[in-house]
Amino acid sequence: MLLTIQANDDRPIYLQIVQQVKYAVAAGVLAPGVRVPSVRDLARQLVVNPNTVARAYRDLQTEGVLQPVRGTGLEITSAATKRCRDDRRELVRQRLRSALEEARHSGLEAHEVEHLVKQEFKRVNGRAVSGDKP
Amino acid sequence: MLLTIQANDDRPIYLQIVQQVKYAVAAGVLAPGVRVPSVRDLARQLVVNPNTVARAYRDLQTEGVLQPVRGTGLEITSAATKRCRDDRRELVRQRLRSALEEARHSGLEAHEVEHLVKQEFKRVNGRAVSGDKP
Amino acid sequence: MLLTIQANDDRPIYLQIVQQVKYAVAAGVLAPGVRVPSVRDLARQLVVNPNTVARAYRDLQTEGVLQPVRGTGLEITSAATKRCRDDRRELVRQRLRSALEEARHSGLEAHEVEHLVKQEFKRVNGRAVSGDKP
Amino acid sequence: MLLTIQANDDRPIYLQIVQQVKYAVAAGVLAPGVRVPSVRDLARQLVVNPNTVARAYRDLQTEGVLQPVRGTGLEITSAATKRCRDDRRELVRQRLRSALEEARHSGLEAHEVEHLVKQEFKRVNGRAVSGDKP
DNA sequence: GTGGTCTAGACCACC
DNA sequence: GTGGTCTAGACCACG
């Protein structure tokens, strides 16, 4: 399992771990039934406090992404893939909503917002959205 | 000046004050030269410790939104309006970018993202974006 | 008597009054024996709180620049002119010393400091110092 | 890290801390990446309230001199050294300008000012400026 | 352990 | 009256 944590990131480390695991699950890199590294191993690998990994794993269990396998550690649940994919879609939706509400609250005109969306879409995807004539 | 602080909000109180003042400035509700309530008055009004308001006002000064008028209080600076508007536009841009990067990172198709954008745009603005056929 | 106070100035208003009076005295604009405006008049003229003018006049009395004339107000003392001129020279000396100590404390090389001095001298006086070849 | 705060100083304690840290950074005593003492430790060492140190550290963060390393404390940023050096040079320049403007405003002759500069330069540095014949 | 936030209450200079 | 500074002590999230 390949995770990278960034000290500069404004998100706490345990959250970075949680989110990256969920990304890997949604992307199919971590399939149901696969065992994740032990708390100690992952902590060593990430050069991070074991408490931090434990916290992340705990949250992932609460979310139903990980489940304990008696005596042997933690593994990806069977429902994890769908759950993580739904999560991701919902996350995108919420961020878009937040951005658009901010725009509206800021009194930006609709066409200005459209412009911003297209601009950033190109920036992120490296190509135009449909209907855009570059 | 009408401010409302929410205890449930995950943002600290002083930040809520800072942001709401900047909103009011950007919206023109607080024009340059206008005096803001005294630290004590606003603290009373918001049922908050005066130090918390003072912290917010201090931050607004370092951002160049407020300036002291010796002995008589604080007022909106002449450059405040532009500064706050620029801030807001940039905030929208960053949130859009974040959402779109999340979408890309999540492997959503371009047309799916467009769909989401239009959906949320309608939800927020109560009408369609140009080029959308309702 | 022509005084101008600036709200933006970081010095308190009462000090601005004190210093400007002393400037006028040093420059000979306010000669010994001349009466200064009453507290109320000057306060009106400067659009300032009378307390502030009173404070300034009090300080000027403490410094021996003003003295009360029974029943008629305050006037410039006979010793005021010399006193104010000495003050000014001393003020310049202190500021120079402060700047040079800061420079030394900051580890600036002697020739760098000289360069700065000449640069700023030109800026302020509009011409070169002796020994400088423009 | 060796800091000393002076109760007599007219500058607030938090500012003394800020400035001394910036001095140490500019002088290279505090290099980028170095961790500063914890708020509590420095507070104990200086016999000062932790909030006061926290305020100073917060200001240093907004100035980009310190950055948080999550959960482990604060460290000197990579850009800190240049930033602090520029600050110091600019401070010297401003003080010199202030002194020279005062001199000009006071009607001192150019050669008088030069004399003062040389005098104070010697006093501060213990030796003559170039071009001066001791 | 770390920093961040908040409250409560005090003193100061300035107006 | 105003803002600015400082102290004391509390709680929180994070590691």
Image (cartoon, coloured by chain):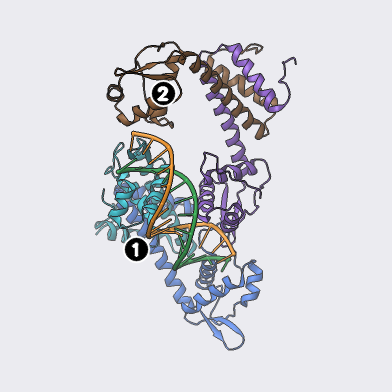
Chain colours: A brown, B purple, C blue, D cyan, E green, F orange
Disc 1 and disc 2 on one polypeptide chain:
no
Residue bearing mark 1: D7
Q: Residues within 10 Å of mark 2 (few under 14, many from 20)?
A: some
Note whether B120 is above or below B79 in the view shown: above
As shown in the figure, which amino acid type bears the numbered disc 2? Gln
User: Residue B3, position in %: x, y?
Assistant: 63, 47
Q: Residue at x 52, y 19 (%)?
A: A88
Q: Residue at x 46, y 73 (%)?
A: C84
Position of D131 with respect to A106 (left or right) is left
Note whether B60 is above or below B105 in the view shown: below
Q: Quadrant of the N terminus of chain A?
A: top left
Observer-nearest of D65 and C44: D65
Tell us which disc is closer to us: 1 or 2: 2
Note whether C82 is above or below C97 in the view shown: below
State yes or no: discs 1 and 2 in contact (Cβ < 8 Å). Answer: no
Q: Mark 2: which secondary structure?
A: helix
Q: Residue at x 61, y 26 (%)?
A: A97
Q: Residue at x 60, y 32 (%)?
A: B89
Position of D91 with respect to A38 (left or right) is right
Badge 2 sits on which subunit?
Answer: A
Note whether B111 is above or below A39 in the view shown: above
Residue bearing mark 2: A61
As shown in the figure, which amino acid type bears the numbered disc 1? Ala
Quadrant housing residue D95? bottom left
Badge 1 sits on which subunit?
Answer: D
Quadrant housing residue B68? bottom right
Observer-nearest of B96 and A12: A12
Observer-nearest of A115 and C12: A115
